[in-house]
Image (cartoon, coloured by chain):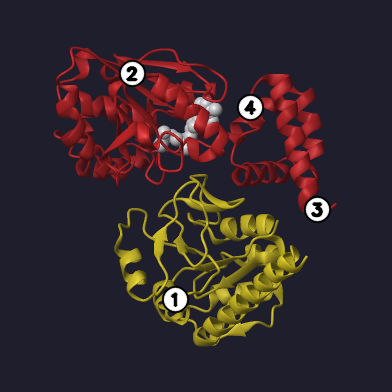
Amino acid sequence: MARKLIVIGTSWGGLNALKTLFPHLPRGFSLPVAVAIHRLRESRGFLIDLLQKNSALPVMDAEDKMPIEAGHIYLAPADYHLLVEGEKFSLSVDRLVRMARPSVDVLFESCADVCGEGAIGVILTGGRDDGARGLARILTCGGTALVQNPETAENPSMPRSAIKATETKNIYDLPELGKRLCALDAANRNRLEREIIYDKTG
Amino acid sequence: MQQQETDELEIDLLCEGIYRRYGFDFREYSRSSLKRRVNNLLGLERLATVSELQSKVLHDTRFMERFLLNLSISVTSMFRNPEMYLAFREKVVPLLKTYPSLRIWHAGCATGEEVYSMAILLKEEGLEKKTRIYATDFNEDVLKKAKAGIYPMSQMKEYTSNYIRAGGKASFSEYYSARYDNVILDPKLRKNIVFSKHNLATDSSFNEFNVIFCRNVMIYFNETLQERVHKLFHDSMCRFGILVLGNKESTRFTPFEKEYQDIDSRLRIYQRRK
Ligand SMILES: C[S@@+](CC[C@H](N)C(=O)[O-])C[C@H]1O[C@@H](n2cnc3c(N)ncnc32)[C@H](O)[C@@H]1O
């Protein structure tokens, strides 16, 4: 099972953080990325447009049962929870979870369940503690946890809560975070190539 | 066996049990959100495992009712996505005006807000007299609330703003009267609405419609069940009938994509081709 998926959770200051992070993910980046950012209920396409200007990868709102494709960046749509459903996304309008919809915890927990070791959770700037539980679950299921350095985050609260919940040492400023994600992507591609060669040689 | 696999197995067994015992079919619901709801319930009921939950569900019908209520979350609002209603007025109403009579189906109507929004729109467009609205849900509890048409006063500010952006032609307050912390919608709006129980997973077609609304219901279904429900809608739809889905749903990932053309693809308004 275990496909690989990067999930990113952020809130206050998230737009700037994503605008700084995305330019570090080059064309050809092969892991899919799903983002839960707390956003206005009726926000139209402007968030997508802004992020697309700062990214070499295609950025879009996730839709219900949309297949998860390599090298795409998907956003949880305004006013919906985003969940991972096998090789696809699914949406829900269930109640707010800790005052948020989309909720970072919902996305992370479903990613942990489905992707197991393949889950890579990233918590960026934001108020309160959404994502802390989700990131802990990703670790429990064998995945990877990364957190933005609270010292340089616009709002340190979400990163701090996530660090406290996971005791992770993987704490980085945004440019370093970009490099870490690229390294994980490269490792993944090497592994895939090895598997293909292995397949061919028997 | 991994913990996750055990969880999966327990949920499979729970769904199978409920289906065989009560006929409610959750076997083909989206797994990820079903799992969340089941886990929430474990917390609420202080149960340790899904198997314990299963035993209670099978032996205790009262518990089953609570369980069902918890599983069918019915978050909704009046004129949800106002832009869609505006587009409906501009692009669909002219077509509806050409028909001698109309049947509209709201499948998964929850507590009715969407249905009354439509009733208001039809009234303002002079279509209410020739229209019959069928509002269905599989949860009898929410249907009761839908029939009553009583909603919290605290919501009215949001609904009024939605109504205006949806192209409302009057003043929203004309459609309700206040009673303490609640409002009662004008009972006249209900005249052409039939509320009834219908389960999209197990029941069949019951009429032919000019318009079908099914918004934010199929997101809870997996692709197999979505396909089945799309077939049900296609079979229940007049030629050139209108299908309206939720804001982030589309016909695109279903085999029925080719059967419909876009009226407004961004706002998820589709028309049956023939
Ligand atoms: C989130 S509400 C959607 C309400 C409204 N259509 C809207 O978009 O605001 C989902 C509704 O679907 C209903 N539902 C779920 N499964 C169903 C089924 N198998 N048959 C009929 N209704 C179902 C639930 O009871 C709930 O009221």
Query: Which chain is assigned red?
Result: B
Mark 3 chain = B
Element type at mark 4: loop
- Residue A157, located in which quarter of the rendered image? bottom right
**Structural crowding at the residue carrying mark 3, measured as other residues with C-alpha within 10 Å and reported as few (<14), some (14–19) or many (≥20):** few
- Residue A33 x/y as whole percent: 52, 66
Q: Tell me the colour chain A is drawn in.
A: yellow
Q: How far across and how far down the image is residue B19, in percent?
A: 69, 24
- Quote the CA–CA distance across marks 2 and 3: 47 Å
Q: Is residue B69 visible?
A: yes
The answer to whether the beta carbon of the residue marked 2 is less than 8 Å from any atom of ligand 1 is: no
Report how far apart the C-alphas of labels 3 and 4 lie in the structure: 25 Å
Q: Is mark 3 within 8 Å of ligand 1?
A: no
User: Which residue, given by chain and number where applicable, does mark 4 sit on?
Assistant: B25
Disc 1 residue type (three-letter): Arg
Please give the chain letter of the residue carrying mark 4: B
**Residue for badge 3:** B3
Q: Position of residue B222 (x, y in %)?
A: 57, 38
Q: Looking at mark 4, is its residue's CB closer than 8 Å to ligand 1?
A: yes
Dot 1, how many residues are within 10 Å of its Cα: few (below 14), some (14-19), or many (20+)?
few
* Quadrant of the image occupied by residue B68: top right
Task: Please say whether residue A165 is visible from this viewpoint.
Answer: no
Q: Are marks 3 and 4 on the same chain?
A: yes
- Badge 2 amino acid: Phe
- Please give the residue where the numbered disc 2 appears in the rendered image: B209
Q: Amino acid at mark 4?
A: Asp
Answer with left or right where residue A75 lies relative to residue B99.
right
Q: Which mark is residue A27?
A: 1
